[in-house]
Amino acid sequence: MIVYKHIALIGLGLISSSFVHALRRAEYTGRVTGTARSADTRAEAKRLGLCDAIMDTNAETVQGADLIILCTPVGAMGAVMQEIAPHIAPGATITDVGSVKFDVIQAIQPHLPNGTHFIPGHPLAGTEQSGPASGFAELFDNRWSLLTPVEGTDPEALRNLTAFWQALGANVDHMEPAHHDRVLAVTSHVPHLIAYTMVGVADDLKRVTETEVVNYSAAGFRDFTRIAASDPTMWRDVFLSNKEATLEILGRFTEELFALQRAIRKGDGDHLHDYFTRTRAIRRGIIDAGQDTDAPNFGRMPEVTAPKPKAEP
Ligand code: NAP
């Protein structure tokens, strides 16, 4: 059950527009206000009818709200918190959806007004799309939303935020912030960096022409390009904020890559086979946990490409 009467969304992109759709699906009857940095995004959100009111400033947006959700890139969250702090109602809960927790908590905590509840969060749900038109009601369904409560968190405030996420379809778990950042470095941040690199490498290979990369892109590369199309601002901020864990996991990744490189050079088929058998089992575990489909090609329909027009004689 959602106990909040007024939810304020700062930032109107993929995550916050998905909140709006999921709240509608949950038949939420309270008030939802929202804002974004640029007038263009605010105008688009108004045109889409996203909230009860789209405000011009962050301060106006949070006035009277009992739940405030920071949905901006993580690098902006400290300054946003400083700006809205004097306008937050006593007793309000403040949460965020940032992909990094330790740095975000450090940036937000010094500005928190007394008598408010800060419960950091991160939904493990997303796509490579961004902006107010990209959200959808099902985004959080059966996905984990990780809450990383800080010391002294009020148990009732935590229960209410947990119930909010559950009402939107998510499963909720609690985690220590630094541990969250390490887990996410493995499961999300470094994989994104690898995708960015792989697409960058293909782009640099002058032996392979641009049309060859585009026309003959096989499934592996296509999936990398999907990830590498993610929002540049969001991901710049993620790497700058989760620096240590990212660098540590990248070091491990590089070591494993060298081991595979050596196995290929030496013709060590057993090593490669054992390695790929282990990774296949990890994929099986993700499917068994209901976190992805086992349909071929991620459940995508086979592509039907229109026949090329015949050249004029
Ligand atoms: P998005 O679609 O790019 O939207 C970000 C929104 O924040 C935009 O509306 C932007 O406004 C606004 N914004 C930026 N700076 C602001 C400021 N100073 N004041 C007010 N609004 C500001 O981003 P998203 O994908 O929803 O991601 C939002 C957060 O969720 C990020 O922290 C990200 O780490 C986290 N997250 C993302 C995913 C994912 O897959 N996308 C998954 C889980 C968590 P303008 O459009 O005017 O710039």
Image (cartoon, helix red, strand yellow):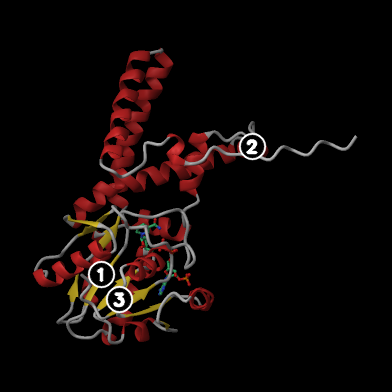
At label 1, the amino acid type is Thr
On the image, which quarter does residue 169 sit in? bottom left
Q: Is mark 1 within 8 Å of ligand 1?
A: no
Where in the figure is residue 95, as x and y percent of width and height? Answer: 25, 69
Tag in front: 1 or 3: 1
On the image, which quarter does residue 17 sit in? bottom left
Task: Answer few, some or many: residues within 10 Å of disc 2's Cα (few below 14, many 20 plus, some between 14 and 19).
Answer: few
Q: Earlier in the sequence, mark 1 or mark 2?
A: 1
Residue located beneath label 1 in the image: 95
Residue closest to the eye, 158 or 228: 158
Where in the figure is residue 14, as x and y percent of width and height? Answer: 42, 63
Residue visible at 32% across and 52% down?
A: 243
Instruction: Please determine whether, in this image, residue 303 is positioned above or below residue 90.
Output: above
Cα separation between marks 2 and 3: 46 Å
Residue located beneath label 3 in the image: 81
For ligand 1, the image quadrant comes to bottom left
The disc at residue 215 is 2
Q: Earlier in the sequence, mark 2 or mark 3?
A: 3
Q: Is residue 247 visible?
A: no
Q: Is mark 3 within 8 Å of ligand 1?
A: no
